[in-house]
Image: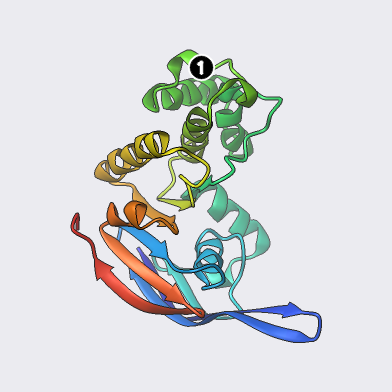
Amino acid sequence: MIEIQDLRKVFIMGEEEVPALAGVSLRIERGEYIAVIGPSGSGKSTLMNILGGLDRPTDGTYLFEGDDVGEFTDDELADFRRRRIGFVFQSFQLLPRLTALQNVELPMIYAGMTPKDRRARAAELLERVGLGGRMTHRPTQLSGGQQQRVAIARSLANRPDMLLADEPTGALDTSTGEEVLALFEELNAGGLTLAVVTHDPEVAELAHRRVSFRDGLIVSDERGRKA
């Protein structure tokens, strides 16, 4: 599904070049559940941003199902993000003035779906994540775990090929985090490819595969007990 070869990313800080990725090669198969781990500044979030089309590499190749993402125009890259990738963030990134239903509808508006169809799809997804009774609630009326469930529902709106989650349990208590991780396992069991950035070894342990980063390089790539 994904093949990256000798991927490099250099940030310019004033007159200094700061390497974030120093030549990373990685293959991710469709249906895998992969955890990307490593200390702060190791390059893991930079990799995820490139995989999601939020950033471009300085050098190297990124193929997504045979398409060279590095050759995409800005419009093609925006369409790639919208249709093929779902994002889940630590801070939820919900719009506070919108209801749960309206937040989940947003990606479908940009995808050009009709109001009737996107409303039905949003309601279906909120039911799926256990929030059928909270559709008209705004984020401030929801717990952290409920907000993250809304964010997960939103990430699935356009039926993405892959879900990228950056520290998805970082702002949650242990019990709520376990509920979110159980939902991830359910989604992956249904065939969704899932990549999670995490500092938490217990979160990483649930993945089929653990890829460790340090200083912009992959230092280990191990199969987990659930592989």
**Quadrant of the drawing holding the N terminus:** bottom left
**Front one among 135 and 37:** 37
Type of the residue with mark 1: Arg
Tell me residue 206's x, y (percent).
Answer: 28, 52
Q: Quadrant of residue 77?
A: bottom right
Coloring applied to the structure:
rainbow
Tell me residue 42's x, y (percent).
Answer: 51, 73
Q: Quadrant of residue 30?
A: bottom left
Tell me residue 9's x, y (percent).
Answer: 59, 78
Above or below for 49 versus 220: above
Q: What residue do we see at 66% from left, 57% from top? A: 75
Q: What residue do we see at 53% from left, 21% from top? A: 119
Residue at numbered disc 1: 134
Q: Outermost residue toward the right?
A: 14
Tell me residue 74's x, y (percent).
Answer: 67, 61
Specify whether 3 is left or right of 46: left
Q: Residues within 10 Å of mark 1 (few under 14, many from 20)?
A: some
Q: What residue do we see at 44% from left, 70% from top? A: 63
Above or below for 205 versus 55: above
